[in-house]
Image (cartoon, rainbow, N blue to C red):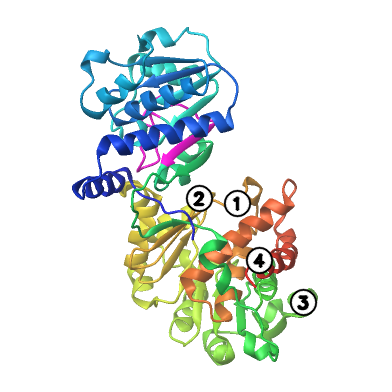
């Protein structure tokens, strides 16, 4: 499965439950510290290590790691924010494991080193770094952090002020929101999760083919095109047809057996000149759309549809049919002044795919009032009563029941016109084949990101769907 994600509070609760059942807390700290040392030694096998310890559990992990690294014949110096006599509990026990000098933290600023092990505070810090800790964070250099780079809020994924920028981060049991959500994720470097024996239960996962690879739709021996689902895509007017075609071609590549482009009369000639395998149907109004989509299992509406009353009528018509809806772009914006009307009509199996601007138009200030992007998307899914896919380099997909997935398998080159239309098309093509909406959204996000990674620099949206055959073939081979 994809890696689980826990908030710092959930991680503390999981540890407390483990301790209540008899596990010794210092034993757990020793497991964590030893895991840190092994991680550092394996990834950075050479160089002098400067260990910066805080007064709590994160610092305790640092002391244990320092002792282990010294036994691996590494050159280690330990610096602490407080004197050894001020340490209490497990942190004091951990400090006793280190038989070298514990130097004042302020002396670390000028001390020679090659690698810094940041064991100051981790992701549970609720205030900005200050004093010498802030200066050390701003110093730069090669940093490895324990849990979350100090200065980053582990739950909101936001810098609280000065913060360490790590080349690598090791955490325990599960990821934290700061490892997958921006801007925090940009400070973490490569993130490694060590299993130290803490059981994890969560409704938040990192996206991965391990979650859904075995459920990718594929035709059986006797399948025919009608058995593979019918996807319909509503086109914009004559000057705005490209977005719908991008979505339609992506849906066909994703495996839909039939794709029909529903075109307004003035755009029929333009669309016909660009289509081959995709069928074309002229529709002049919402009622004609209703008649045409009777055989379609899924309909995409919104890409370059136009922000006008006609688009709103088309959306309302679609949501009154049996077809599942994928609503994007203009299909969402037309409800900016009447969000509740949209919420009332959406169904559990519908999918909306806003970018941040569209999300704000239909869900107001959720991104500002909720603790992070995951919670904002969960709240939005609950309000809308459908699956919400909030696009971005840290795409979040949420169901009304609170289940959520974060997709970080992407590339900055996807920030280009039409990229979201391709994503909607992939999701629609999978839904048309009978994949449940939430799973289809997760699949589509990963496939879209993988396609972008394969194209790389110079990517334009027309490149993406051509990557899907190789990607899908590889996935089917892996999960056959």
- In this rendering, the answer to whether 97 lies above or below 382 is above
Disc on the earlier residue, 4 or 3: 3
Instruction: Tell me the SS state at disc 3.
Output: loop
Q: Which residue is under mark 1? A: 410
Mark number, residue 275: 3
Label 3 vs label 2: CA separation? 33 Å
Disc on the earlier residue, 1 or 3: 3
Picture residue at 44% right of the left edge, 80% below the top:
316
- In this rendering, the answer to whether 211 lies above or below 348 is above
Label 4 vs label 1: CA separation? 21 Å
Mark number, residue 478: 4
- In this rendering, the answer to whether 24 lies above or below 224 is above
Q: Is residue 407 left or right of residue 264?
A: left
| Nearer the camera: disc 3 or disc 2 | 2
Q: Nearer the viewer, residue 418 or 170?
A: 170
Label 4 vs label 2: CA separation? 26 Å
Disc on the earlier residue, 3 or 2: 3
Task: Determine contact: label 4, label 1, CB under 8 Å.
Answer: no
Q: Which residue is under mark 2? A: 394
Instruction: Tell me the SS state at disc 4.
Output: helix
Instruction: Tell me the SS state at disc 2.
Output: loop
Q: Nearer the viewer, residue 138 or 179?
A: 179
| Nearer the camera: disc 4 or disc 3 | 4
Q: Quadrant of residue 388?
A: bottom left
Specify the segment rendered in magenta: 150-171
| Nearer the camera: disc 4 or disc 2 | 4
């Amino acid at each position: 499965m994809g890696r689980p994600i826990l908030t710092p509070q959930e991680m503390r609760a999981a540890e407390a439950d483990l301790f209540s059942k008899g596990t010794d807390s210092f034993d757990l700290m020793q497991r964590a510290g030893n895991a840190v040392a092994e991680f550092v030694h394996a990834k950075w096998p050479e160089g002098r290590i400067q260990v910066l310890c805080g007064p709590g559990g994160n610092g305790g992990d640092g002391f244990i790691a320092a002792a282990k690294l010294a036994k691996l014949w590494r050159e280690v110096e330990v610096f602490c924010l407080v004197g050894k006599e001020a340490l209490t509990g497990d942190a004091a026990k951990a400090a006793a494991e280190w038989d070298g000098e514990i130097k004042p933290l302020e002396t670390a600023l000028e001390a020679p080193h090659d690698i810094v092990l940041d064991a100051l505070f981790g992701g549970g810090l609720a205030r900005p770094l200050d004093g010498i800790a802030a200066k050390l964070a701003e110093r730069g250099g090669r940093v490895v952090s324990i849990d979350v780079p100090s200065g980053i809020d582990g739950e909101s994924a936001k810098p609280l002020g000065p913060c360490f920028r790590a080349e690598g981060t090791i955490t325990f049991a599960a990821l934290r929101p700061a490892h997958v959500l921006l801007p925090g994720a940009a400070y973490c470097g490569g993130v490694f999760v060590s299993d130290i024996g803490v059981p994890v239960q969560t409704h938040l996962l990192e996206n991965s083919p391990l979650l859904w690879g075995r459920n990718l739709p594929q035709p059986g021996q006797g399948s025919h095109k009608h058995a593979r689902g019918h996807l319909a895509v509503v086109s914009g007017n004559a000057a705005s047809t490209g977005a719908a075609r991008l979505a339609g071609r992506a849906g066909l590549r994703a495996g839909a057996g039939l794709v029909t482009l529903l075109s307004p009369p003035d755009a029929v000639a333009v669309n016909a000149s660009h289509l081959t395998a995709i069928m074309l149907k002229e529709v002049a109004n919402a009622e004609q759309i209703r008649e045409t989509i009777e055989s379609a299992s899924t309909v995409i509406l919104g890409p370059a549809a136009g922000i006008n009353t006609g688009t709103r009528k088309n959306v309302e018509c679609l949501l009154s049919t049996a077809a599942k809806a994928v609503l994007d772009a203009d299909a969402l914006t037309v409800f900016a002044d009447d969000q509740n009307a949209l919420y009332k009509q959406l169904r559990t199996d519908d999918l909306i795919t806003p970018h941040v601007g569209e999300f704000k138009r239909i869900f107001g200030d959720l991104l500002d009032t909720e603790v992070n992007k995951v919670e904002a998307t969960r709240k939005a899914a609950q309000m809308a009563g459908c699956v919400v896919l909030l696009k971005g380099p840290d795409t979040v997909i949420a169901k009304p029941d609170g289940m959520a997935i974060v997709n970080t398998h992407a590339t900055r080159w996807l920030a280009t016109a039409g990229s979201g239309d391709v994503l909607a098309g992939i999701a629609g093509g999978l839904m048309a084949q009978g994949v449940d909406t939430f799973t289809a959204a997760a699949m589509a996000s990963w496939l879209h990101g993988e396609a972008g990674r394969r194209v790389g620099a110079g990517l334009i949206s027309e490149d993406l769907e051509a990557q899907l055959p190789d990607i899908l073939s590889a996935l089917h081979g892996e999960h056959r």
